[in-house]
Image (spheres, helix red, strand yellow):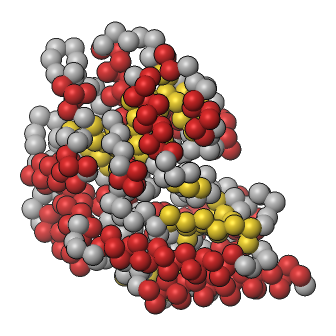
Amino acid sequence: MKSTRELLEADWRHAWHPFTDQSLWEGVDSPVIVRGEGVWLEDSEGRRYYDGNSSIWTNIHGHSHPALVEALREQAGTLCHSSYLGLANARASELAMTLSKSFSGGALQRVFFSDNGSTALEVALRMELQWRWMRGEKERRKVVAFENAYHGDTLGAASLGGVGRFFEAIAGLGVEVEQVGGLAGLLAVDGDDVAAVVIEPVIQGVNEMTPWPTGMLKSVRAWCDEHGAHLICDEVMTGFGRTGALFACELEEVVPDYLCLAKGLTGGTMPLAATLTREVIYEDFKGPGKTLYYGHSYTANPLGCAVALASLELCQRDGFLLSVREKGELMGALLKQLSSHPSVKAVRRVGMVSGIELAGDGSSRGGKALCKRLRERGLLTRPILDTVVWMPPLASTRAELQAMGHIFQEALSQELSSSLS
Ligand SMILES: Cc1ncc(COP(=O)(O)O)c(C=O)c1O
């Protein structure tokens, strides 16, 4: 293998990273990750780090979980890919059935595969807008989204996003969207031209890990029913046990019209997404002139589907969700200890999703500085402005969570002493 220096130089010279000011990236040493095991990531210098961010919210069962590796190995030896155009594939058939049965007793029977969280949303939008158009409801083109929401980066998904700093360069492009602030904002909307409402159920991730008030999702569902709008639930971050339920919608017993899944679908191993919808919507796409002209070359990739099946099986084992809830409680206790620290403004958590908001100036300087200190102590995570995300793999043991909590304590104390000196 090339040396760390050579690898970094190749990166600085040729690669372009997402959500990154490259002027601050080039020439600055950063870990080159070469291995993963359980909750650990290891860099090219042999240093080990806790994956405190679940590799951007994807990892569920830990890195290189034997059951997932075996599923991938077996599938790779059989079939890596075949087109989903005019052909079925064995793993995709099984996964479509398993996924639809896994959510709310099969209420969403139809599964459309794509590649990532953004495309899961893109698919829901394309289905919804075409469905309205086919029914002659030309006036219903608008999608209501919430302020500070994040639904991905493809143009349609990005136009739903309410995070100004990400999307100002493309303002006005994409689908027609009305941004509203919370339930009060939604209640003030005249529903006649609304096709759908889109929401991250129970907790908004990119909005600095902000939980919705209890009952929010139920109220949004009720508003949609009253106004003839569809509900799109974006469970790209919350799905597959993160919140203590297999899907966050289940916490409020809400069934959306579209359920968007990605990230944890493959346990954090392969890019794969799924958009689930109701049979009554699907039925309207049958017949001449009603085709959904949407798809990608790697749609329903068998490797992704095989590993998703193996991951779902682990999620559905007895005790899995209970252990997430119990470990979430432990995280809550550890966060409570952190919240008494003078540099901490607030802590927020749902299940094993949490954020530690620093008493910063909102510029993300404090968040970045804390993440640097955490990394030096062997814990990797990311800031969102001044909120530092703590979202470890669901497979983290109690001892590992306690060790991570301890690293946060130490790094915060060092942060404070250096800001006082
Ligand atoms: C709620 C939500 N939706 C959509 C996305 C986009 O997913 P992806 O990055 O896989 O395109 C994200 C990514 O963080 C997300 O948190």
Q: Is residue 9 above or below residue 398?
A: above
Residue 118: name its quadrant. top left
Asked whether the viewer can see residue 169, the reply is yes
| Tally of numbered tags | 0
The residue under the point 31% across, 52% down is 272
Residue 146, how many percent across, how many down? 57, 38
Residue 160 in percent (x, y) is at: 53, 35
> Which of the two residues, 289 or 396, is positioned nearer the viewer here?
396
In this image, 323 relative to 187: left or right?
left
**Viewer-nearest residue: 385 or 230:** 230
Residue 394: percent from left, percent from top? 39, 73
Q: Is residue 125 left or right of residue 211?
A: left
Residue 170's place in the image compared with 208, above or below, is above
Residue 18 occupies quadrant: bottom right
Task: Give the residue at x 30% y 31%.
Answer: 294
Q: Is residue 208 above or below residue 50?
A: above
Task: Specify whether residue 270 is in view.
Answer: no
- For the N terminus, give its image quadrant: bottom left
Q: Residue at x 36, y 26 (%)?
A: 128
Task: Give me the residue at 30% from left, 14% from top.
Answer: 134
Q: Is residue 97 left or right of residue 5?
A: left
